[in-house]
Image: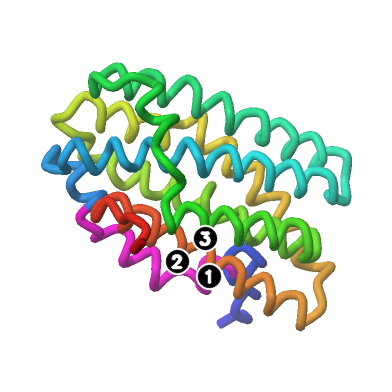
């Protein structure tokens, strides 16, 4: 019997967030997307908060790009920063149309508490942490959405709007995007000391928890207490 292979950096990161991901898969927001039972009001809340979040996420990706250690990584994250806004404009426009909502209704919706917390966390980590820490913090939004998309794509949804959302993140095109980021992330693993590696694992775990919280906030249509 040969030696047990050493886990890659991304495998270690995923292990740090795996327990939360398991809870994400059984969250009623996502099961409601798949079977069509999710109230439209919850999905509208999600779209409004996602619009706010994606703007902050694009800024975080711009910070990651500015700190990247290779030309390919600079270009990759810069393109994704621009792409995050393009996704918001294209996908959200289609979904809002299917929901019968006007873009102005979404734009007038204030930033919710979970959106503010998650966005602030990503921007703070990207601005003050190391390059590797910044990558670890933004990675769950790529990876969790891809895997959730694949999981739900096997079932799709009887609701056309929900099926559109699922198809976007369960697509082969999005899979390629995430695979590129995972390759960049794994290349960083060999350069990290033990303390920085632990910080990266903690950031990945925290951001994965925020992914759960984001869907939970939409399911409950969470508002500020005062």
Q: Which residue is mark 1?
A: 205
Image x and y of residue 9, in percent: 66, 67
Give how far apart the Cα atoms at labels 3 and 2 are: 12 Å
Residue furthest front as drawn = 226
Image x and y of residue 182, in percent: 63, 51
Q: Which residues are magenta?
A: 13-28
The residue under the point 62% across, 73% down is: 201
User: Does 165 appear above or below 32?
Assistant: above
Crowding near pointer 3: few (<14 within 10 Å), some, many (20+)?
some
Q: Are the residues at dot 2 and dot 1 in contact (C-beta closer than 8 Å)?
A: yes
Q: Quadrant of the C terminus?
A: bottom left
Q: What number is the disc on residue 209?
A: 2
Please give left or right for residue 217 compared with residue 5 in the image: left
The residue under the point 88% across, 46% down is: 70
Please give left or right for residue 62 compared with residue 48 in the image: right
User: Does 125 appear above or below 153?
Assistant: below
Asked whether 207 or 183 is in front, the reply is 207
Give how far apart the Cα atoms at labels 3 and 1 are: 15 Å
The residue under the point 15% across, 41% down is: 39
Q: What number is the disc on residue 117?
A: 3
Residue 186, by quadrant, is bottom right
Asked whether 26 or 177 is in front, the reply is 26
Image x and y of residue 216, in percent: 31, 58
Mark nearer the N terminus (3 vs 1): 3
Q: Secondary structure at mark 1?
A: helix
Q: Secondary structure at mark 3?
A: helix
User: Does 101 appear above or below 51?
Assistant: above
Crowding near pointer 2: few (<14 within 10 Å), some, many (20+)?
some
Q: Taken as a whole, is the magenta stretch helix, strand or loop?
A: helix
The residue under the point 65% across, 46% down is: 181
């Amino acid at each position: 019997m040969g030696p047990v292979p050493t886990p890659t950096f991304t495998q270690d990161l995923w292990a740090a967030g795996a327990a939360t991901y398991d809870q994400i898969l059984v969250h009623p927001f996502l099961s409601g997307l798949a079977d069509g039972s999710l109230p439209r009001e919850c999905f509208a809340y999600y779209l409004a908060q996602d619009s706010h979040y994606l703007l902050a996420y694009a800024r975080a990706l711009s910070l990651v790009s500015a700190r990247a250690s290779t030309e390919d990584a600079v270009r990759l994250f810069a393109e994704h920063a621009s792409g995050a806004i393009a996704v918001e404009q294209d996908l959200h426009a289609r979904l809002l149309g299917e929901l019968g909502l006007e873009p102005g209704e979404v734009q007038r919706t204030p930033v919710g508490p979970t959106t503010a917390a998650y966005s602030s966390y990503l921007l703070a980590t990207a601005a003050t942490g190391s390059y590797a820490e910044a990558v670890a913090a933004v990675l769950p939004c790529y990876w969790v959405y891809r895997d959730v998309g694949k999981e739900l794509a096997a079932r799709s949804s009887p609701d056309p709007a929900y099926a559109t959302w699922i198809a976007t993140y369960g697509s082969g095109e999005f899979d390629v995007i995430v695979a590129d980021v995972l390759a960049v992330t794994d290349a960083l693993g060999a350069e990290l000391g033990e303390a920085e590696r632990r910080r990266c694992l903690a950031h990945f775990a925290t951001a994965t928890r925020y992914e759960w919280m984001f869907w939970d906030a939409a399911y409950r249509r969470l508002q500020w207490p005062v």
